Amino acid sequence: MRPAAPNRNVAPMVYTIGILLLFVAMGVYARTLEARKREQKLGEATLGQIDTGSFMLKLALLGGARGVAADVLWLRAEDLKKAHEWDRLKATVDLITKLQPHFLSVWTFQGWNLAYNVSVEWDAPEDKYEWIKQGIKFLKEGVKKNERSADLVWDTAWTYYHKLGFSDEAIILRRLFRDDDDEPFKTYVDLDSGIPYRRDDNFQLGYGWFTNAVEMVDAGATVSATGIQQRIEYVDKQPQRKGKPGDLAFRSMPAHAQSRYASGLEKESVLGVEAKFGEEAQLQWGKALNEWIKFGQYVFKAPNEVWIGGKRVSDQPIQIDDVTNPERYGKLHENQKYWTNRWADQMNYRYWKDRCAAEMEKDGVDARRYFYEGTKALKAGRLVREKLKSGEVRDGAVENYQHGLALWEKLLERHADYRNDDLNMRDTGLIVRRYLYALRQAGVPEPEHVPFKDKARAVQGDNTVDPFDALEMIKTPRSGQVAPSP
Amino acid sequence: MPAPPILLPLLWAQAVQVRMPSWLQWLFVWGDPRYTDERAFGAVITWTKVVGLFCLVAWSASWLLAPADPRLTPAPGGRGRQTKLMILLVGLLGCLLAVVLQVLQSTRRVATLSVAGVSVATLQGGLFLGLLLVLAEYVLWSNVRRKGRPADLAVLAGVHLALASGFVVSYTLATFGGVRPNWPQIAVGGAYMGVTYMGLVVLASIAARMLAEVSTLRPRRLYAVAWHTWVESFRRMWAPWVVLVVFAVILAFTSWFLKPPRDAELGRIYVGTLMLLTSILLTAMVSILAPVSLPQDIQQQTIYTVVSKPVRRLELVWGRVLGFMALVTVLLLVFGGISLAYLERNVGSTIAEARRKADEYAKAGKMQFARLKREEAEQLETRMSARVPVKGQLSFLDSRGKPKPFGIDVGQELEGRSFVEGATPSMAIWQFGFVPDKFAPKNAPRFLDRRVPLEALLPRGTIEELQNRRAELRDALAEAGQRQQGADLKSSESAALSADRTRIADEVKAIEAELKQLEDRDRELRRQAAAAKDRATAAGLIAQADSLHAPPVRLEMIFNVYRTTKGELGQPVYALLVVRNPRPNVPPHRAYLPIHEYYTDRQTVPARILVGSRGFLTIEVQCLTPNQYLGMAESDLYILSSQGRFWDNYLRGLFGIWLQALVLTTIGVFAGTFLSWPVALVKTLAFFVAGLAAVSTLQTIALQSLTGGGPFESLIRLLTHDNLQSDLAPTTAVIVAKTFDSLVMPVLARLVYVIPNFASLDFSNTVADGYAVTWAQAGSTLLLALGYALPFSVAGYFVLKHREVAA
């Protein structure tokens, strides 16, 4: 019998049905996926702002080609860095982030690369500033695209705080920041209230961003406690670097930034901008004290386990602030005392808390004003009190230091922790040394009682100057030629 | 004919001691493919030799693989054919085993065996290669005798004669000056030269045939084929429209993908991107259209109609190239126009905005921001022009004042720049004039012409130009006087010199009169300006006085700063710049300048510095700030001879893209002559991608400087995570990989001659950096492109000629 001829219409029909079935299955699966993404807050929109350019690029390089393209661009970025092609480097790095906007390491690494490595290659401070700004803006762009990343928020805060505030050229960079008319760059939005704050000082911006990072970690901890995070299975989970339990430095940064801002007010830490004292300084030191107390009262957990009454106890609560409260401290278990003490020492908590408490007092601020005026007079060669042509009497370096040290002595009697700290001893010693130098230069006999005279002896060979004080670093026309260091 | 200035290889080392006649040197230059004349036409010689070698391969292959005449050869499967196949197999297997043995010896899996100082692997390889050559020789002779015309027989004879002459030249060179013959060296040298001469013979025969073919070309037919191609390009996938739309769409959304970090670089990045986009779109378009064209004609049998007409095959190939290139030209002009308008709108507005901001900052007392914005605007304006730099030669004095070819290395990753130390005698010196070539071999010093173009910098009729002419004439007068006083001068010569002197003296007088008039006028104008009551009148008078002088000489420089200490906070590093005219009575020009790293620092020098210099000038740069270093490369300082318009420079930049498209079109048309359209398309695209991305790797392979072995060994290293330097254990896999590499690498190394180097046809960086693409540059690049396009199109013609398209 002749075999039946195959029906030519069967195969196309089978294919068509197969295709349709696959489409239906895909549709159902996509809807399920969408629902899960919504439920677990995993959609693109919930990660951060959606970028049209990024979307188009990702569309053009479907699937795995994206990773390869990102790799090639990364290598190109490295080559451009070697060739000192900074602007092309930045443009290339931007393309990488368009391809992989949720790959956090790119934002962290390249933001740091721009703000630290590229900026240092430029000679003029204004060019350095421009590249630090590029780095910070890059990180902020990363935050926009990854709104849930506390790490990127912290990186942004750190760059505002550290790169602008602690560079060798910090006094000039801080001035450039102050003069910058880029409003969004000088504004942070408080995560809690949603209110934007525009600030002229990089430490204030650092404070705002650090605070947001801490709040985000705390909010994340709450989410974690509800168990939603645990249900998510990440294909390529990116580890959280900052704000892990026990990350003391992370939590102390808002307090540090606020303290730096307060101390920066009382000297020419911004080139060409006079120091500020009075109520403003008192207020800022008060705010710093609050931040330290907030940090001190945060409940950390002891990392070890102990046996208490035959029971194994873990996660004992630790509040660093207890070291400054003998009553509470006395009630602690030995293990708690150990960790409270150890972490307080590690963070130099006693010093910071007591310093803020001392500096926020009127005596503290006044003493600082006398020291500032004294140094200005010394640099200008006005050693003792003089009468101006207008009839006005103006104190010289000697009188200013004298008044200041008298107040300082009284103040520190009330703040033993601050007084006895090495950092303060050195600072006070340097002031006393200047005072003695002014006395010698003016030919005024040394008084019988010179407060903290022993501290001056201890810093006799110390010739360092404060790199964050323009009065000491720059020969400004206002202060005239810098006198030789005593 | 002068002897070629070549660096002779060690093989011919004796030639340095014994003066070799120039004809022998020329024979060597034309014979050995590894060496060439070092003058400009040396590249053409190399090109001819390489093309000759490829012609030889193609010619041999065509005769070796030519289907034999059935009347003269035994039937397929006959004994003669079987014997030849057996010999071929044995020969190939023997060669392969020789390679395996060589790899085993190099990896120390087996001890190196040698007979009379020659390794067994080499002997074996030589033996089997010889066998294959004998077979090839036999097949060649029999095929050419049976099928060839007398001309082919003449070429065959010529090729053998060329081979013999190679050995004769090699022997003559090696024994020149009575040196004892070194037979292995003579054999190797002879083989190299013989094969090259063979290639030249084949090339000459092909050139003769091509000349005959070219003489039959008719513009009317070329035009007809080109027009057909043009029309077809629009019909096929509406390619030009698609390209145009894609260009417009991408341009409209460029700002989504491309955000220059600083406005200063906006122009540079936009220009680079626009040219890249134009290049990619057009080259991609021709890569798709050109290879598809001919195969589809053949497939759809429309070619039958064409070839049955009196159309030459060369007209079919070149006509197509012409058609595609006409399309490329029109699209390039459209893209160029759109790009220029786009740049004008974006960059122009950014410049205006930067200037406005700079003024605003200056008013507000924010001087650092004002400087930044001003520099940004200047940088943008400079880049949107076409500067013609005159570059000198850079040498250094070290910290003790000793001359050095390079400065101090401060440890930067790329060592392009070297540094001078601050507040020491260390300095960088740029010399203009006839300067010794730093890279010439010591035994063959060379001078480069780096003179300052006085005719461009001193406009005719200006005070400085007249002073310069006077100085030159006075020199000539003094020289004639000296010669006249010299001994052994014939009376006729003395009389001629006297006449010369009188003529020159008259000229000097005339110039002096003219000069005096101008100088008086200059003084008068300045006096009036000083006495003028209002500023505008004074400025007008000063401008009039200035117009009597040549414009000041403009210097541009970009220096790097390397600080060993922070120095004084906020203070720049300072440099001292001294411009010297070698004439003793011209005072040098000095300038102190703060260095703005990565920005172009500009200095103007009064034009009088050039008077009497004859184009010779020295520019010295010292770093004045102690403990700091200034870094520079030769091209970091130059005299600006002119600053042209941007738009025509941009169009010259597009010419580079046109050349890229030309090369790809010829490759595409060539591929279409013998491949089906999908294969031809893939082949052309492969050339396109390889020309963009693989040229540097191929160069590394050709120079044998590839670390980590060839592709197969690299694959093993990738899989086993071994680094590039470590010795691989001689496992079987490694031996197999190395054997494959030994076979593949020589082929890959030759690809460097075939894959076009698109980067060298690219002017985008020059245009984006604001430097002029000179006509000389454009001309040499055109030659380079033709160097690729011509052989490919000619090869296409031969394939098409021998292909039975209309059968």
Image: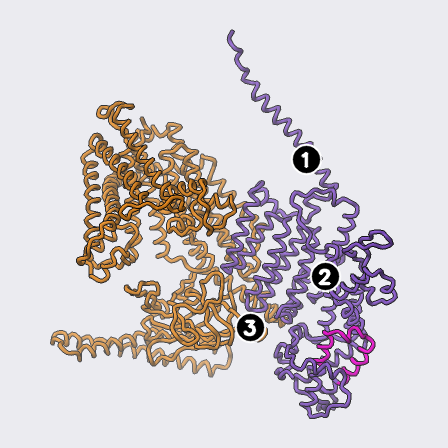
Q: Which residues are magenta?
A: A402-431
Q: Nearer the viewer, mark 3 or mark 1?
A: 3
Q: Secondary structure at mark 1?
A: helix
- Label 3 to label 1: alpha-carbon separation: 61 Å
Residue B380: which numbered mark, if any?
none
Q: What letter labels the chain drawn in orange? A: B
Residue on which disc 1 sits: A30
Q: Secondary structure at mark 3?
A: loop
* Mark 2 residue type: Ala
Magenta region, main secondary structure: helix
- Label 2 to label 1: alpha-carbon separation: 44 Å
Q: Secondary structure at mark 2?
A: helix
A275 with respect to B154 (left or right): right
The tint chain A carries is purple
Tags 3 and 1 both on a single chain: no
Q: Quadrant of residue B229?
A: top left
Q: Nearer the viewer, residue A165 or B545?
A: A165
Residue on which disc 3 sits: B565
Residue on which disc 2 sits: A249
- Residue B633 in percent (x, y) is at 43, 65
